[in-house]
Image (cartoon, rainbow, N blue to C red):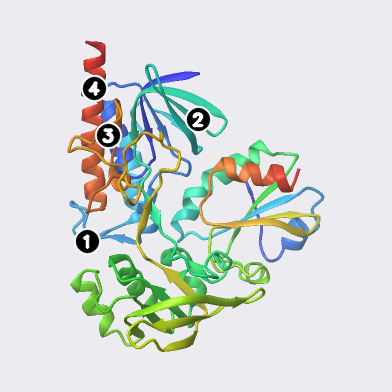
């Protein structure tokens, strides 16, 4: 399962993480986000020990989404050493997320 | 390599129905869906015209019911996207993510997605002020000003949804008359938060790298007059395009790329069927997708029987 992150622990879990981190910004009202949910959890298992996979509910956390200028969801942001290395908006397939991770994070 | 009698590509209402009819007929079936099932139903807040739900049903609730209906049956599922489809001797070889499968028949139910309007700035600011899903992104614009581009049912319907959230909404349409249903037009035209800009095209979506979208450059195509419109976001609903980039090159499609079928959902390729929004047709609804799915599955079953005979 993906790790739930909040505004409160975002720096700790994401910005200061030794591993690259993929954050899925989502909300319960968003259909495409719901559609991606199972894929994000699958990726958490597949990349265990290599990439940390996190989810942030933008309904409950507004500071981090606005910090990264997010105005559409689902948005995925890939962080490495506390920096944004790639991002994508809209529902995308598992292969395309794996490609993004392989190219930018590993 | 795994082989099947039928591969259903896409898990919206057409694909879920086709899969249901196939597994109930005892056909060895795989359902390929790159996301979780539901398709565009998941992007719809209320579905008001699917028979049997007189007080409307939430899109995701109807999806849950479709999925639950399939649960008791034996059905293989693959959760990745199709990259390539090649006709082979005994059917089709399908590359799904890193895995290849083969199927005697294919039912293509990949649906359609919102088209881009093709304006400078659109791609740059997608996700940062440009949106294609009111239900997903509307809440980011509480008390703000947005524009909606389009003149069909989706544009009107989504405008009515957004108007409940935003402070001010400009509905921008390149023609004088709207194509969308009169019942939506009537509601939009008198809505206190809506401003209707007819015969107007968007020349550019403007923004800045930090704030995202800040405004639009417009031209009135009748008067030629140009203007600037400050907005915080823009929602694009200018029609649909088929999701079919990976189909065999020999599959017959119409000018817009939608797949041509007969009334039994047969395409020009043997054992290759299409159902739902990806088909060349006029009416794209959950109800018609379901009908297409059932028809295609029945035709695929008949085709398989004929092959074995």
Callouts 4 and 2 in the same chain: yes
Q: Position of residue B51 (x, y in %)?
A: 18, 52
Mark number for residue B303? 4
- Could you tell whether B266 is left or right of A68 in the image? left
The foreground one among B65 and A65 is A65
Residue indicated by mark 1: B55
Q: Position of residue B246 (x, y in %)?
A: 45, 38
Indicate whether B308 appears above or below B162.
above
Label 2 and label 1: CA atoms lie apart by: 42 Å
Residue indicated by mark 2: B95
Label 4 and label 2: CA atoms lie apart by: 23 Å
The foreground one among B219 and A87 is B219
Label 1 Cα crowd, 10 Å radius (few <14 / some 14-19 / many 20+)? few
- CB contact under 8 Å: marks 2 and 3: no
Given this view, does label 3 or label 4 mark the residue nearer the observer? 3
Quarter of the figure with residue B265:
top left
- Could you tell whether B163 is left or right of A56 in the image? left
Q: Position of residue A91 (x, y in %)?
A: 51, 52
Callouts 3 and 1 in the same chain: yes
Label 2 and label 3: CA atoms lie apart by: 20 Å
Label 1 and label 4: CA atoms lie apart by: 39 Å
């Amino acid at each position: 399962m993906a790790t739930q992150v909040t505004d409160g622990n975002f720096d700790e879990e994401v910005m200061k993480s030794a591993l690259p981190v993929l954050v899925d910004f989502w909300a319960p009202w968003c259909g495409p986000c719901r559609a991606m949910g199972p894929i994000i959890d699958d990726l958490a298992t597949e990349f265990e020990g290599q990439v940390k996979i996190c989810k942030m509910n933008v309904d409950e956390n507004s500071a981090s989404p606005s910090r990264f200028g997010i105005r559409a969801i689902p948005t995925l942001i890939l962080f490495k050493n506390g920096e944004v290395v790639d991002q994508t908006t809209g529902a995308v397939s598992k292969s395309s997320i794996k490609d993004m991770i392989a190219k930018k994070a590993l | 390599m795994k082989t099947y009698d039928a591969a259903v590509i896409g898990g919206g209402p057409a694909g879920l129905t086709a899969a249901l009819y196939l597994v109930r007929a005892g056909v060895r079936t795989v359902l390929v869906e790159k996301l979780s099932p539901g398709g565009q139903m998941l992007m719809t807040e209320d579905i008001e015209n699917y028979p049997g739900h007189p007080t409307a049903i939430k899109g995701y609730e109807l999806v849950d019911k479709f999925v639950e209906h399939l649960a008791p049956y034996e059905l293989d599922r693959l959760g990745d996207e199709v990259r390539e489809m090649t006709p082979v001797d005994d059917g089709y070889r399908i590359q799904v993510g890193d895995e290849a499968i083969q199927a005697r028949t294919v039912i293509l139910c990949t649906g359609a997605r919102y088209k881009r309007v093709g304006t400078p700035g659109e791609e740059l600011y997608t996700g940062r002020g440009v949106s294609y899903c009111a239900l997903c992104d509307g809440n980011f614009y509480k008390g703000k000003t947005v524009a909606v581009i389009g003149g069909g049912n989706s544009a009107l319907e989504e405008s009515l949804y957004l108007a409940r959230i935003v402070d001010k909404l400009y509905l921008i349409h390149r023609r004088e008359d709207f194509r969308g249903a009169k019942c939506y037009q009537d509601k939009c035209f008198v809505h206190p938060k809506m401003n209707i800009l007819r015969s107007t095209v968007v020349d550019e979506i403007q923004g800045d790298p930090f704030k995202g979208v800040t405004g639009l450059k417009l031209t009135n195509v009748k008067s030629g007059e140009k203007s600037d419109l400050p907005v915080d976001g823009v929602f694009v609903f200018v029609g649909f395009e088929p999701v079919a980039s990976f189909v065999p090159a020999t599959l017959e499609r119409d000018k817009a790329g939608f797949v041509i079928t007969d009334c039994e959902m047969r395409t020009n390729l043997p054992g290759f069927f299409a159902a739902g929004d990806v088909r060349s047709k006029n009416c794209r609804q959950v109800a018609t997708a379901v009908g297409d799915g059932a028809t295609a599955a029945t035709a695929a079953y008949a085709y398989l029987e004929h092959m074995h005979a």
